[in-house]
Image (cartoon, grey):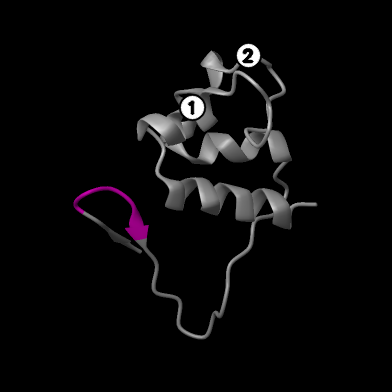
Amino acid sequence: MFELTNGGFIIDTPGIREFGLIDFKKNEIPRCFPEMEKLLPQCRYKNCTHTHEPGCAVKNGLVTGDVSSMRYNSYLSILNDKA
């Protein structure tokens, strides 16, 4: 595992083709995105999925630029994979 100077890690795993998430509940996924996690207390609803609810701070963060669309799309991809 190699730490990146601007944050994050790169993992070199010869022979491993993919990684997956196990034992995650859907409501825990936003906490894996620091820029989303800091906005969670501002959502109108405690059980907000950050997909369609009015008053969602994460969706508002997309508009203001506090959450990048690339990161949000990654969130949606993970969320939809956990069906």
Circle 1 packing at 10 Å, graded few (<14), some (14-19), many (20+), is: some
> Which secondary structure class fits the magenta region best?
loop
Q: Nearer the viewer, mark 1 or mark 2?
A: 1
Q: Is disc 2 placed on a helix, strand or loop? A: loop
Asked if residue 44 is positioned above or below residue 11 in the image, the reply reads: above
Circle 2 packing at 10 Å, graded few (<14), some (14-19), many (20+), is: few
Residue ranking furthest to the bottom: 15
Please indicate whether residue 32 sits to the left or right of residue 65 in the image. right
Disc 1, disc 2: CB below 8 Å? no
Return the disc, 1 or 2, that comes first in the chain's sequence.
2
Residue ranking furthest to the right: 83
Residue 27: quarter of image: top right
Which one is in front, 62 or 19? 62
Q: Amino acid at mark 1?
A: Asn
Query: Which label was assigned to residue 60?
Result: 1
* Location of residue 42 in the rendering, given as x and y in whole percent from the top left corner: 52, 15
Please indicate whether residue 1 sits to the left or right of residue 42 in the image. left
Query: Which label was assigned to residue 44?
Result: 2
Residue at figure coordinates x 60%, y 18% from the top left: 55
* Location of residue 81 in the rendering, given as x and y in whole percent from the top left corner: 71, 57
Q: Is disc 1 placed on a helix, strand or loop? A: helix
Q: Amino acid at mark 2?
A: Arg
Query: Which label was assigned to residue 2?
Result: none
Give the distance between the C-alpha atoms of the residues marked 1 and 2, in whole angstroms.
11 Å
Residue at figure coordinates x 57%, y 73% from the top left: 18
Residue at figure coordinates x 63%, y 14% from the top left: 44
Which one is in front, 39 or 4? 39
Asked if residue 10 is positioned above or below residue 6 in the image, the reply reads: below
Q: Which residues are magenta?
A: 5-9
